[in-house]
């Protein structure tokens, strides 16, 4: 029976998450991330015997070369911010450059230079508008770096981002509810907070929506408070980036070589979190028909307490490594497509087709 290569990429406004196959020891989807930043590559790079090349790739897009990867923070200026926070971001050059960055990290595990099923995600604010365009755009042959390395994507599928976390939840925890529970998936991302109601792989469109009260809005308020209270000459963009890095890594926020306790400043963004979850509550009402609420995404820990306050009678389940849950779930969905294709291929071969 033919085997198929499956990969998944979830390109958010703050971070790019990607899968890189199944770990043979843990049987878990191998996944990682890097910042969603893609500045134009410098014309000259300091590269001597005493220095190391930063962990980035140079990728060509639209007659320009961009730098992307885990070490991109060393390439950013103080005033650099995410280039795009609008609805057309998935069709932008920045999005393509970041997707090519993810493909570069995967390339060594693709001996034939091909992906049979590439799964991408979109927030619900853009899914219905851009799903078909995105799938068409990234099916085919792609030159992913300045050395001319090529990756071919044979099939590209696009799903709503929270569906990935639901698939991941089902793979890991569905037995707790005896199969396929009716779930409310809440996904606080960098730009949007998405919520998705489904049972099995069947969605409730009327109760699945998004708002623009994601982590970036919260972190901006916190950064402004820090700058004001400490009388700093740093920019809001700088402080937001440093807070986000600390939040994702679980390390202390370091400013001017000293750790800063963020807890006294987090109240500056609390009203945004409350408004985001109240809008979900208005859509869901009591949610008496919901079996479980699953919290996922990079902002899960910031929003979870407010979710518990608004839905006190529900079981609130926070996924492990919530920032990687969507992409791991997408990979599982891609594996399911691949198994179906493998069975179909086997049936054709046995029939002599």
Image (cartoon, grey):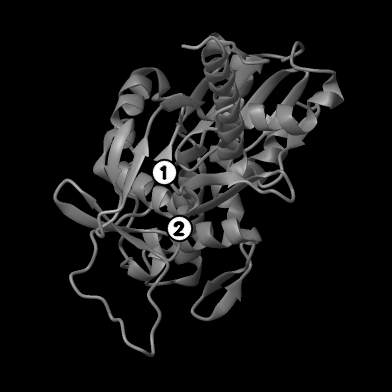
Q: Residue furthest left?
A: 63
Q: Determine the residue positioned at 30% across, 50% down.
A: 144
Q: On the image, numbered disc 2 is attached to which residue?
A: 240
Quarter of image, res 199: top right
Q: Position of residue 310 (x, y in %)?
A: 71, 28
Labels 2 and 1: the sequence-earlier one: 1
The answer to whether residue 125 is above or below residue 187 is above
Look at the numbered disc 2 and give the secondary structure of its residue: helix
Farthest-out residue, bottom: 50
User: Could you tell me which quadrant the N terminus lies in?
Assistant: top right
In the displayed structure, 214 sits above or below 162; it is: below
Q: How busy is the neighbourhood of tag 1: few (under 14 within 10 Å), some, or many (20 plus)?
A: many
Residue in front for this viewpoint, 279 or 324:
324
| Residue 117, horizontal then vertical, whole percent | 47, 31
Q: CA distance from mark 2 to mark 1?
A: 13 Å
Picture coordinates of residue 51, whole percent (x, y): 38, 85
Q: Is residue 153 visible?
A: yes
Q: Quadrant of residue 262?
A: bottom right
Q: Which residue is mark 1?
A: 13
Residue contact at pointers 2 and 1, CB within 8 angstroms: no
- Left or right: residue 60 versus residue 190 is left
State the image coordinates of residue 8 (x, y, percent, origin top left): 50, 38
Q: Nearer the viewer, residue 255 or 149?
A: 149
Number of disc labels: 2
Element type at marker 1? Answer: loop
Q: Residue at x 39, y 25 (%)?
A: 126
């Amino acid at each position: 029976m033919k085997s198929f290569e499956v990969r998944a990429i979830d390109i958010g406004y703050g971070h790019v998450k990607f899968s890189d196959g199944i770990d043979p020891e843990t049987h878990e989807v191998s996944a990682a991330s890097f910042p969603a930043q893609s500045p134009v590559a410098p014309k000259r790079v300091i590269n001597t015997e005493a220095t190391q090349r930063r962990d980035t790739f140079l990728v060509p897009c639209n007659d320009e070369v961009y730098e992307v990867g885990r070490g991109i923070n060393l390439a950013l200026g103080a005033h650099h911010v995410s280039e795009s926070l609008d609805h057309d971001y998935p069709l932008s050059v920045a999005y393509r450059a970041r997707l090519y960055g993810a493909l570069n990290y995967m390339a060594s595990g693709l001996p034939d230079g091909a992906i049979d099923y590439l799964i991408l995600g979109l927030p619900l604010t853009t899914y219905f508008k851009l799903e078909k365009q995105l799938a068409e755009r990234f099916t085919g042959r792609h030159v992913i770096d300045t050395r001319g390395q090529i990756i071919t994507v044979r099939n590209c599928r696009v799903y709503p981002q929270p569906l990935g976390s639901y698939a991941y939840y089902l793979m890991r925890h569905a037995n707790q509810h005896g199969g396929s529970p009716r779930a409310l998936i809440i996904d606080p991302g960098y730009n949007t907070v998405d919520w998705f109601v489904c049972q099995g792989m069947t969605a409730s469109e009327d109760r699945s929506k998004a708002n623009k009260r994601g982590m970036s809005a919260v972190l901006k308020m916190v950064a402004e408070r820090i700058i004001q209270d400490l009388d700093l000459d740093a920019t809001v963009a700088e402080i937001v980036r440093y807070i986000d890095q600390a939040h994702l890594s679980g390390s202390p926020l370091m400013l001017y070589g000293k750790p800063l306790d963020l807890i006294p400043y987090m109240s500056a963004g609390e009203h945004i979190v409350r408004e985001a979850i109240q809008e979900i509550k208005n859509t869901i009402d009591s949610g008496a028909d919901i079996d479980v609420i699953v919290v996922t995404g990079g902002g899960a820990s910031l929003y979870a307490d407010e979710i518990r306050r608004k839905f006190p009678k529900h079981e609130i389940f926070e996924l492990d490594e919530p920032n990687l849950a969507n992409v791991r779930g997408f990979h599982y969905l891609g594996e399911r497509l691949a198994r179906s294709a493998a069975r179909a291929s086997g049936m054709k071969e046995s029939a002599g087709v």
